[in-house]
Image (tube, grey):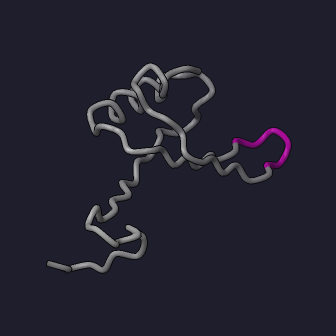
Amino acid sequence: TGTLGDHDISIASVVQPERSAGQPVPIVMRTHEARERDVQRALAELSDEAFVVEPPHLIRIESSLEEGSSGAGASEGAA
């Protein structure tokens, strides 16, 4: 569907493992930076699609925007 695009959400990567015949398959998508409101609205719409057998889950990935930081592996509790 165009649900993500309708909410200005761009996909950065997709992982879809092999599936057994007749079984649902999980799909893991990582998006480019998007507004929380848009993501929540898109997930609500996707939940209503016939091909979605379980509610989608959101795991927020935040990165540091500090100069010189790669954003990966940021430590917890940093000031």
Residue at screen point 34% across, 72% down = 68
> On the rendered image, what quadrant is the N terminus found in?
top right
Residue at screen point 63% across, 27% down = 51
Q: Magenta stretch mostly in which secondary structure?
A: loop
Q: Is residue 50 above or below residue 35?
A: above
Q: Total of numbered circles in the picture? A: 0
In the image, farthest residue toward the right: 21
Residue at screen point 29% across, 65% down = 64
- Which sits in the foreground, 56 or 28? 28
- Residue 6 part of the magenta segment: no
- Which sits in the foreground, 64 or 57? 64
In the image, farthest residue toward the front: 67
- Determine the image quadrant of residue 65: bottom left
Relative placement, left or right, of 79 versus 45 is: left
Residue 41 is situated, as x and y percent measured from the top left of the image, at 34, 27
- Magenta stretch: give its range: 19-24
Relative placement, left or right, of 59 versus 35 is: right
- Which sits in the foreground, 48 or 37? 37
Q: Is residue 21 above or below residue 17?
A: above
Q: Is residue 33 above or below residue 8?
A: below
> On the rendered image, what quadrant is the C terminus found in?
bottom left
Residue 78 is situated, as x and y percent measured from the top left of the image, at 20, 80
Residue 5 is situated, as x and y percent measured from the top left of the image, at 49, 24
